[in-house]
Amino acid sequence: MTQITPQPGIMDIALYTGGKSTVEGVSNVVKLSSNENPFGPSPAAQEAVRRVLHEMHRYPSTDHGSLRQAIGEVHGLDAGRIICGVGSDEIIHFLAQAYAGPGDEVVFTEHGFGMYKISARVAGATPVEVPEAERVTDVDALLAACTERTKLVFIANPNNPTGTMIGQAEVERLADGLPPQAILVLDGAYAEYVEGFDGGASIVDARENVVMTRTFSKLYGLGGMRVGWGYAPAGIIDVLTRVRGPFNLSVPALAAAEAAIRDTAFVEKCRAENTRMRTWLAEALMEHGVPSDTSCANFILARFSSREEAEACDLFLQKQGLIVRRVAGYNLPAALRITVGDEASCRRVAHVIGRFKAGER
Ligand SMILES: Cc1ncc(COP(=O)(O)O)c(C=O)c1O
């Protein structure tokens, strides 16, 4: 008999469920379940990957200097305070590993992104879920939940899966009200969808207790490449870099991300198209009696009258080859999260939901 057991907390982790991508018996599905860019990656990113194909036998850069330089230039940030990871998921993991352990608390909101809880558990820390105010981050509730054991407070702004956002003054109030041992993490996975928004970079620059995370998986269309990054005070970057594996990002991933961030025309086009179709989709759903909060991201949280109705609508959509995301796991059982696809997909999803609301099954 062995006595092999995992670290405390590991067996409490509920496995992350990604968005579905297939429906049995249905071909030609449209996947609107993972907030991917309907236009794919920038052609420049694809070309950059083709160019490095012959270099696969070489180890990648350990310091990601060239990518950090590009991110710094495009966003006007200090490249020395950027760290790159295997998706922003990995930056979230680094933070939890480096700053939270048994006896510590990791705070996030009730409809917050699933990796906050998983990373806290992996680190052996205690996840603390805080109510939102009608699907909006509630700064007072977050501050009230902090104790002398709080090490990390995560908010996504805009939030997933609600799509809602809080303003700069509220984020600053949160940062300034935290206990001295706590770090505020501003998860900016959807920041690019908000015209003119810096994701919280200026709040990071003005403080010692704030970190911003960003990703190439959403607007840049590189979810499959797995590249994200964090921006933080120098002392925190030093800590996180010690936790990071030296070769965490592959040669093609680095090449794709660098080309993608420099292709600002593609970014502009995707942002504008998302804004146009998001407005259209929200209005079309509203006309069918399906309300949603104003979304600042690339998805809409469609609200139904009950869990049963949301599930029935999901099944009806699946039969028509449309895959959206159930969000019961995010304490939103009566809602479905629908990624803003291209115009044809948006029209199709709105049409099918209209048929469902008219009684078809
Ligand atoms: C709020 C939020 N943060 C972080 C991530 C992680 O993305 P990635 O690891 O692909 O960068 C996601 C992905 O869905 C997200 O929605």
Image (cartoon, rainbow, N blue to C red):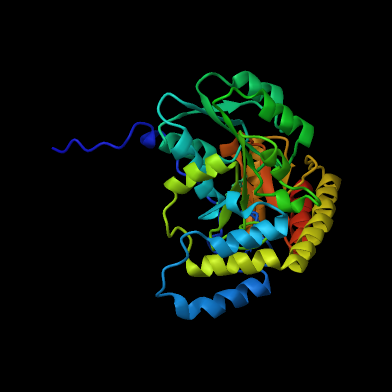
Q: Nearer the viewer, residue 309 or 238?
A: 238
* Numbered marks: total: 0
Nearest the eye: 133 or 90: 90
Residue 133 quadrant: top right
Query: Is 267 rendered above or below residue 338?
Result: below
Left or right: 169 in relation to 221: right
Q: Measured along the vertical axis of the image, is residue 234 above or below residue 109?
A: below
Q: Is residue 343 visible?
A: no
Please state, as top left, top right, bottom left or bottom right, where the N terminus lies in the image.
top left
User: Is residue 208 in view from this perspective?
Assistant: yes
Please give left or right for residue 263 compared with residue 211 in the image.
right
The quarter of the displayed image where residue 320 is located: bottom right
Q: Position of residue 98 (x, y in %)?
A: 45, 38
Seen at 70% across and 22% down, the residue is 140
On screen, 348 above or below 171? below
- Viewer-side residue, 174 vs 323: 174
Q: Pinpoint residue 358: horizontal percent, then vertical percent.
A: 79, 48
- For residue 127, side relative to residue 327 (left or right): left
Residue 332 picture location, percent across and down: 64, 36
Q: Residue at x 53, y 61 (%)?
A: 64
Q: Is residue 178 above or below residue 347?
A: above
Q: Position of residue 209 (x, y in %)?
A: 61, 33
